[in-house]
Image (cartoon, grey):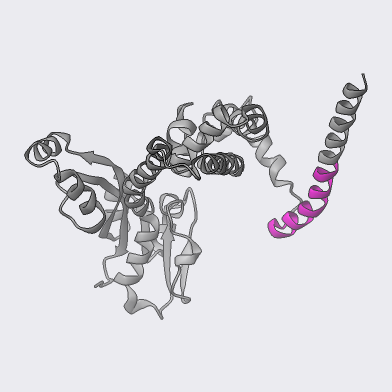
Amino acid sequence: TLRENNVLLLFSKRILACVFAIIMALVLTIPLDSTLWQYLVWPEATVLLYNNPVENKSANWGTSPRHWYWCSALPRALNPSTMLLTLFGAFFYEPNRLGYSFILPAFLSIFLLSFLPHKELRFIFPTLPLLTTAAAVAATRLDNKVQGSLSKKKFIPYITLAITASATIILFYPAAQLNYPGGVALFQVHELFRQYRNEVKILHIDVAAATTGASRFGQQFSSWTYDKTENIDDPSLYFSYDFRIAPIEPRDQADLLSRYNLTIVDTIHGYDGIHLDLFSLRSQLKESPLYFFRFIFSLFFSNHSQSLFQHKTKPELVILAKENFSWR
């Protein structure tokens, strides 16, 4: 039929547009990447071959369960209010149009990525604009329904979203501050050894620190060398380092301290979950129902709630220095 022919023609045009876009992208990016890497390379193809379904070498960098994207990555990447609005749009506001255009492609992509053992939050970044767009459309639809109405029931969605967003801030914001022990360690090294800022020194940053915030943006001293060598096979290299930021491992505690004349200067802690004393909270609520509001207020503005609710930490990194150095 004429309609089927038009659909087929439109589909063919989209395929040609995609092919043309891919060719143009390769023509522009391969020379640039090859110049930066100083050899002929197509990075995307290299990564694809490395992570092929047969060998799946990406698993060497760690694995996560299949539900990790749904239960951990998405809640951290999107405010739960956004997720609620996305689901609202999928089921109540033009589900066919909104679902097929935005939500279904995003969820399908996340579903397929869930079968790869190695998972990272950045892998699902391309799906986030689709989900936030769907949430924006759903929020607009919800707002249009509520406007002009004085019914209390109409404000229930707004109240639900506000409570959800507030709870998210309470839980995630303090936790986010504890997720970058590498950045904290790099800052602490500069504070401890500021008297050597104009001297030539070498600081070795281990992988665990480099992946948790110890980036070039935190490097303060131009006379220092910030070394990020991975998988050191030659132990003699440790003698050349004046300072190290390393994970807490038996190797660091034993070999590096005794054999390479290093000492632990400081220990950096990282995030290790949430502790909520529900029994004490329930006892306080029985004494005074208004305690709940004081509890919520104290989460933001005081330390009164630390005995009931706190973000747990654990030692993640150590700052090591040669024993002949002094520190503040």
Name the residue nearer the viewer: 231 or 41. 41
Q: Position of residue 159 (x, y in %)?
A: 37, 42
For the question of whether residue 311 can be seen, the reply is: yes
Name the residue nearer the viewer: 150 or 292. 150
The structure residue drawn at horizontal position 60% and vertical position 43%, both measured from the top left corner, is 133
- Quick check: 73 above or below 221? above
Q: In terms of image quadrants, where is residue 197?
A: bottom left
The structure residue drawn at horizontal position 49% and vertical position 51%, both measured from the top left corner, is 230
Q: Position of residue 303 (x, y in %)?
A: 18, 55
Residue 212 falls left or right of residue 35: left
Residue sitting farthest toward the left? 287
Name the residue nearer the viewer: 242 or 284. 284
Q: Position of residue 141 (x, y in %)?
A: 56, 40
The structure residue drawn at horizontal position 22% and vertical position 46%, both measured from the top left corner, is 310
Quadrant including the N terminus:
top right
Quadrant including the C terminus:
bottom left
Please provide the residue range marked out in magenta.
20-38
33 in the magenta segment: yes
72 in the magenta segment: no
Residue sitting farthest toward the bottom? 198
Q: Position of residue 327 (x, y in %)?
A: 26, 71
Q: How many dots with numbers? A: 0
Q: In terms of image quadrants, where is residue 16?
A: top right
- Quick check: 98 above or below 171? above
For the question of whether residue 61 can be seen, the reply is: no
- Magenta stretch mostly in which secondary structure? helix
The structure residue drawn at horizontal position 86% and vertical position 32%, both measured from the top left corner, is 10
Residue sitting farthest toward the top? 1
